[in-house]
Image (tube, helix red, strand yellow):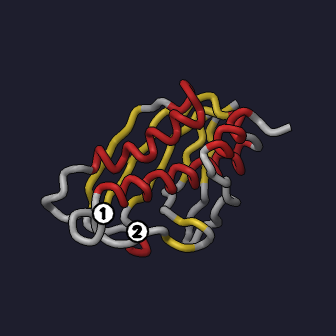
Amino acid sequence: MSSMIEKRLSEMGIVLPQAAAPVASYLPFARTGQLLLTAGQLPLKDGSMIATGLLGRDLDTAAGLDAAKQCAVNVLAQAKAAAGSLENIKSVVKITVFVASTPDFTEQHLVANGASDLLAAVLGEAGKHARSAVGVASLPLNAPVEIEAILEIA
């Protein structure tokens, strides 16, 4: 039987991918006690970036929001790989959203809402979290958004 969380994902038209393998010298996640820390997740879908470039130059806020949403999907994939089931997520404690943007772009917080809203919609109260949204000059592979997460798991 599928879990309630997987049912919500399905209703949203989201297929959870296999957790991405690292592309450099790092672990995709680390666990200490009940805390799970994910490596930064890029907006990859089916092995390709859904968008590239800088917010404020190449992409608008809406495209950034979609990229952040895909990053959150990939965070959930890592959480499932680490915890065995999405039902083992007790809470999303904090996410950090890195937004590759021009110096005058000031809507990083709105871009980050793509991830925050998705996590809350999928996980309910357990998906509500603290958050930082940070503008950066560039990200790996010319990604517009990268998200790392700290989760409490069973």
Camera-side residue of 8 and 22:
8
| Residue located beneath label 1 in the image | 100
Where residue 148 sits: x, y (%)? 47, 50
Camera-side residue of 4 and 150:
4
Q: Is 39 displayed left or right of 112 in the figure? A: right
Where residue 89 sits: x, y (%)? 65, 34
Q: Residue at x 27, y 63 (%)?
A: 55
Give yes or no for contact between labels 2 and 1 (Cβ–Cβ under 8 Å).
Answer: yes
Where residue 128 sits: x, y (%)? 48, 30
Q: Residue furthest right?
A: 1
The disc, 2 or 1, on the residue closer to the chain's N-terminal end is: 1
Q: Residue furthest left?
A: 104
Q: Is 111 displayed left or right of 73 in the figure? A: left
The quadrant of the rendering that contains the N terminus is top right
Where residue 3 sits: x, y (%)? 76, 35
Q: Does 87 sit above or below residue 39? A: above
Q: Residue at x 48, y 68 (%)?
A: 50
Question: Which element carries disc 1, helix, strand or loop?
Answer: strand
Circle 2 packing at 10 Å, graded few (<14), some (14-19), many (20+), is many
Circle 1 packing at 10 Å, graded few (<14), some (14-19), many (20+), is many
| Residue located beneath label 2 in the image | 143
Q: Residue at x 49, y 32 (%)?
A: 93
Disc 1 residue type (three-letter):
Ala
Q: State how far apart marks 2 and 1 are (Cα).
A: 7 Å
Q: Does 40 sit above or below residue 118? A: below
Quadrant hosting residue 53: bottom left
Q: Residue at x 72, y 33 (%)?
A: 4
Q: How many marks?
A: 2
Q: Does 4 sit above or below residue 55? A: above
Camera-side residue of 7 and 70:
7
Question: Which element carries disc 2, helix, strand or loop?
Answer: loop
Disc 2 residue type (three-letter):
Ala
